[in-house]
Amino acid sequence: MERVSGLLSWTLSRVLWLSGLSEPGAARQLRIMEEKALEVYDLIRTIRDPEKPNTLEELEVVTESCVEVQELDEEDYLVIIRFTPTVPHCSLATLIGLCLRVKLQRCLPFKHKLEIYISEGTHSTEEDINKQINDKERVAAAMENPNLREIVEQCVLEPD
């Protein structure tokens, strides 16, 4: 009888583990962060480049690996994006960062804090641009400019 009980217990724990209901805490947490990162990537990959008829994904400005999600607390997450401009002197890098921010602020279905950076060493003025795209007042002021707002709206518009 003891043997049957042990076998039943082992079988039940294996079924729960395979179903994800009894997944170890760290592994479950990692899986959730990876799923949220993919959710973020799915939102930003379709953003259009301001100059070209391509998406940021097609131009490899954003990739799955450029998105990181960390849990801040039970219902709040830190989303970090590191994008790579097409050239080191890209004049539209700030605008691309603004498009990323606007799209995610509008579309992310979970509470989040957002940090957007240019990948280290990929732009000649990355430090200045990183400050601009992570400054709430500058972002708000930029979105008050009707011409800039129109460009952002065109870039973040979902394809049909």
Image (cartoon, rainbow, N blue to C red):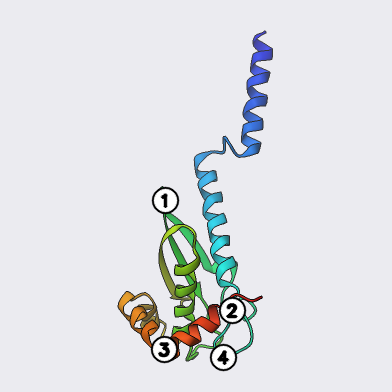
Give how far across and how far down residue 121 sits, in percent.
47, 80
Q: Nearer the viewer, residue 81 or 139?
A: 139
The quarter holding residue 128 reads bottom left
Q: CA distance from mark 3 to mark 2?
A: 23 Å
Q: Residues within 10 Å of mark 2 (few under 14, many from 20)?
A: many
Crowding around mark 4 (Cα neighbors within 10 Å: few <14, some 14 to 19, many 20+) is: few
Quadrant of the image containing the C terminus: bottom right
N-terminal of the pair, mark 4 or mark 3, is: 4
The disc placed on residue 122 is none
Marks 2 and 4, how far apart at CA: 11 Å
Q: What residue is drawn where x is 48% and y is 88%?
A: 92
- Amino acid at the residue labelled 2: Leu
Mark 3 element type? helix
Residue 7 position by quadrant: top right
Question: From this viewpoint, which residue is outermost toward the top?
Answer: 1
Q: Which residue is mark 4?
A: 51
Please give the residue where the numbered disc 1 appears in the rendered image: 75
Give me the disc on residue 56. 2
Q: Which residue is at 48% across, 86% downward?
A: 150
Label 4 – label 3 distance at C-alpha = 18 Å
Q: Are marks 3 and 1 in contact (CB under 8 Å)?
A: no
Amino acid at circle 4:
Glu
Disc number for residue 146:
3
Between disc 3 and disc 2, whose residue precedes? 2
In the image, which is nearer the foreground, mark 3 or mark 2?
3
Amino acid type at image mark 1? Glu
